[in-house]
Amino acid sequence: MTAQALLFGNKPVDRFLRWFAVRPGLTLTLAVLAALGPFITKPFNIDDPMSIWVARQIQAHPANPYGYEVNWFGFVSPMSEVSTNPPLSCYYLAMAAAILGWSEPALHFAFLLPAVAAILGTYRLARHFCGRPLLAACATLFTPAFLVCGTTLMCDTLTSAFWVWAIVLWVEGMERDDFWRLAGSGLLMALAALTKYFGACLIPLLATYSLTGQRRIGRCAGCLLIPIAALAAYQWATYALYGKGLLSSAVDWTMTTKAASGVSVAASGLTALAFTGGCLAVATFLAPLLWRTRVLVGFATGVVLFAAVLFIENTMLKKYDSLSGISRTDLEVQIVFWAVGGVSVLGLAVADVWHWRDPRSCLLALWVFGAFLFTAFVNWAVNGRSILPMAPAVGILLARRLEQGALTGKNPRQWDVLICLVVGAALALLVARADFLFATAVRQSAERTHAKYGRGRETLWFEGHWGFQYYMEKLGSKAVATRQSVAKQGDFLAIPLNNTNVYPPDRKYALLLEVLSIHGPRWLTTTSDQVGAGFHSSVWGPLPFVFGRVPPERVFMYVIGPTPPISQAVGLRDTNVNASQ
């Protein structure tokens, strides 16, 4: 009897499982499709519209992706000043739309390919680092970070695919002294950096890995010059097109916005820990199997004391003054719980270096800590999309730690591990569903608003952006633009509450008619400042998702009175805060 037969048995069900076990690529591909497929009809939301607009521009003018104006902050400005990411993902989107069309299912279907590539790359990389690569890949897939980002049209999943395969080729190139694999890795590093600027972090990461492994870089240095040259060319090309290099402009914008946010280093650190534990929830649920009890108690005690100081001094939650669907105590408990998970994730990286002290453990640790430090202290705000890059490394660390069962003092049973994975996967799917319901409610609010107020002779104006703007403009309504829009008496103004860049009108010029309510997620959400959930930006809350009483999406409807410029009527102010980074 073969080893596989001994492991799985000879019953029909056992043979079925064995068939998939010996085909990990097919198994993981089907797992990605099963996890993301139910959300393929998700409405466009958050920054999806910007990706679509750039993709449409690319189809018309391929060499000038940002050569048009957009109203994203409540005033019209060049797209080159609004976008904080390079356009490679939008080129992919434009190509997909040319083949499949612009519908929601078509474009989400196109983005299943990079999701599959990212998970298969994680499996390939994990084979070099641990004996349970399938576990590492599944622990990456079934996280809120991966599933929520995988249901958007933004650049994060494509960046992750380039990122992980760049590391795969670099590791294999170093092991086999294969120049062409190293060159291929350099090309993928360039593609990652031109999809999202964070991809440039691969350059120092892999350079350090080479130095720790061979004490020299040698001809690897030439391959590292590929992404550097690509970024330099992009900086020069955008300067020629738009009068400024968009790489340096994005860095300046991030630093300026971060400095102006007013968030303390301690509060940002705790928020990043909570996002890490929540966005990588599988690692949090596995923590009791990974650590001795006294170590886990130490993690929890440290987080409780650290958080208590911030809560008592009110430096953590003072800016979230609109909480209504959850008590502060409930929110604080959830912050502490997920922050303990975040500490466990960082602890995995430290423990792995301490135990192995080799180039691979250093690579994983620098990977995790680099992404965490960028999210907490460099990026303009903490968000789940910035946590996503560390997911493959954490999946591999989990597999490596479980293989060191003796070090935990427990040697966990397979069923215990499986139960934790299933619980983590269930939570990730629920979070992805909550984000789906949020996007659906946003589209429905736009459709209902237009159906009631947009069919007459009066103009229907609106504030707000994200998916609400996309669908309102698609239906024919007009976005308010400071210093440009002029309303007439009798026009209508729609203001969605749970949105960005929205301001109430001057009551001297606008009369509130009614508040339209559309129910989205009821008890779990990813975006609502009323419960403190801010997956796409911690501006909305200190957690990526929150369990609580989620209020419905509400649209305040006004009628314009005596004719003023609409910018005076609605009191718009300039701002530079969005969720694009």
Image: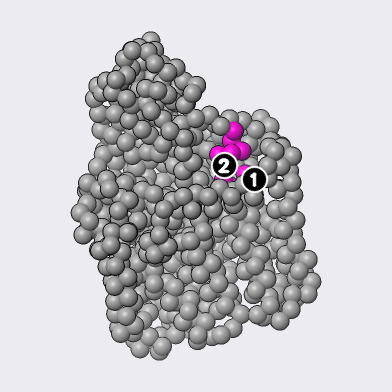
Image quadrant of residue 464? Answer: top left
Which stretch is magenta? 78-88
| Circle 1: residue type | Leu
User: Does residue 547 lie above or below 172 as drawn?
Assistant: above
**Is residue 236 shown to the viewer in this render?**
yes
Q: Position of residue 94 (x, y in %)?
A: 61, 38
Which residue is depicted at the point 67% across and 80% down? 213
Placement of 310 over or under 155, stated as above or below: below
Residue in the foreground of this view, choosing between 12 and 203: 203
Q: Residue at x 70, y 53 (%)?
A: 231
- Under circle 1, the secondary element is helix
Callout 2: helix, strand or loop? loop
Q: Is residue 525 left or right of residue 268?
A: left
Is residue 87 covered in magenta? yes
Instruction: Give left or right: position of 384 versus 506.
Output: right
Determine whether label 1 and label 2 are within 8 Å by CB: yes
Let me know if residue 500 is in the magenta part: no
**Vertical placement of residue 201 versus 415, above or below:** above
Q: Which colour assignment does the render follow?
A: one colour
Q: Position of residue 245 (x, y in %)?
A: 68, 45
Q: Looking at the image, which residue is at 44% across and 77% down? A: 348
Residue 90 vs residue 279: left or right? right
To which residue does mark 1 refer? 246
Q: Position of residue 23 (x, y in %)?
A: 53, 67
Q: Which mark is residue 548?
A: none
